[in-house]
Every structure is written in structure tokens, then in C-alpha cells.
């Protein structure tokens, strides 16, 4: 089950979404609205192609498109922030410097980290 980005808890620095106790890198807020819209459209098209295409070649191409869109959005690849802070993408929040913040701000809908 996917959680809408606007419903997910975001770290105070807005770099990550917290989903089931895990950090997921947020999109680069510096992207123009047009660029973001184009990349999200590309991402959704590629995800639909993954579900629809039964051939291995088609699935490989769709996965590549997903990766390109996520890199363009800043969710993968080099981090989009410039202060030199490390990337905690996909880490359990309890194992990062965000642990104290998370413990004090976890909403009722957020299950505990495993």
C-alpha cells in the first residue's frame, strides 16, 4: 500500500519522507514546476509499463525509465542539497541523526520502525 507524499511525515529539513520508520529521499524542491511535472509523468508512465509489459526486454527498459525519472527528481543518485550532509536514504530513521526528532513527532498513523 502506498502512502501519499503529502500524508507522509517529512523530516524538518524536508530532505526525506518517513514511511514505516524508514527514510526515503524527497524530490528536489528546487525543480521548476514544469520539470517536476514532466519527470513525474515519465515516472508514472514507466511504472505503468512495468505492470503492463510481460517481456523481459520491456521490463528492463521500463526499469531504466523509472531510474532516470527518479534521478531527475533527485530521489536517487547524487543528493540535491549542497551543505555536504550525508545521505540516509532507505535507512531506518532510528539509526540516523533523525531518531530523536522521529521519536518525539511520530503521528498515530505511523507504525513503529522494525
Image: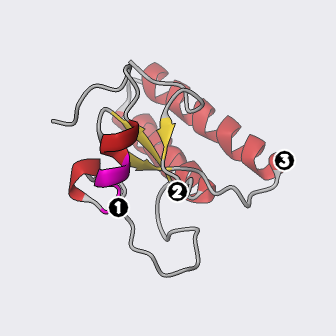
Residue 95 vs residue 29: left or right? left
Mark 1 and mark 2: span between their CA atoms? 10 Å
Label the magenta part by its dominant secondary structure.
helix
Image coordinates of residue 84 in percent, x first then y, are 48, 81
User: Is residue 21 something one can see in this rendering?
Assistant: yes
Magenta span covers which residues? 97-101
Q: Residue, x 54% and y 46% (percent of image)?
A: 65
Look at mark 3 in the image and give the residue it sits on. 34
Marks 3 and 2: which is nearer the front?
A: 2
Image coordinates of residue 109 in percent, x first then y, are 38, 20
As for residue 37 lying within the magenta part, the answer is no
Residue 46 vs residue 59: left or right? right
Mark 3 and mark 1: span between their CA atoms? 28 Å
- Residue 20 appears in which quarter of the rendering? top left
Rendered view: 95 above or below 19:
below
Residue in the foreground of this view, choosing between 36 and 61? 36
Residue 3 vs residue 106: left or right? right
* Badge 1: residue crowd in 10 Å (few <14, some 14–19, many ≥20): some
Earlier in the chain: of badge 1 and badge 2, it is 2
Which numbered marker is on residue 15? 2
Marks 3 and 1: which is nearer the front?
A: 1
* Badge 2: residue crowd in 10 Å (few <14, some 14–19, many ≥20): many
Which numbered marker is on residue 88? 1
Earlier in the chain: of badge 3 and badge 2, it is 2
Q: Residue furthest front?
A: 104
Image coordinates of residue 5 in percent, x first then y, are 56, 33
- The quarter of the image holding the C terminus is top left
* Badge 3: residue crowd in 10 Å (few <14, some 14–19, many ≥20): few
Q: Residue, x 45% and y 29% (percent of image)?
A: 50
Q: Residue, x 56% and y 53% (percent of image)?
A: 14
Rendered view: 6 above or below 108:
below
Amino acid at each position: 500500500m502506498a502512502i501519499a507524499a503529502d500524508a507522509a511525515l517529512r523530516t524538518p529539513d524536508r530532505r526525506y519522507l518517513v514511511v514505516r520508520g524508514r527514510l526515503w529521499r524527497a524530490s528536489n524542491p528546487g525543480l521548476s514546476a514544469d520539470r517536476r511535472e514532466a519527470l513525474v509523468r515519465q515516472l508514472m508512465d514507466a511504472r505503468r509499463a512495468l505492470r503492463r509489459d510481460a517481456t523481459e526486454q520491456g521490463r528492463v527498459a521500463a526499469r531504466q525509465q523509472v531510474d532516470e525519472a527518479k534521478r531527475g527528481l533527485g530521489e536517487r543518485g547524487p543528493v540535491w542539497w549542497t551543505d555536504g550532509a550525508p545521505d540516509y536514504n532507505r535507512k531506518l530513521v532510528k539509526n540516523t541523526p533523525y531518531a530523536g526528532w522521529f521519536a518525539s513527532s511520530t503521528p498515530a498513523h505511523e507504525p513503529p520502525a522494525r
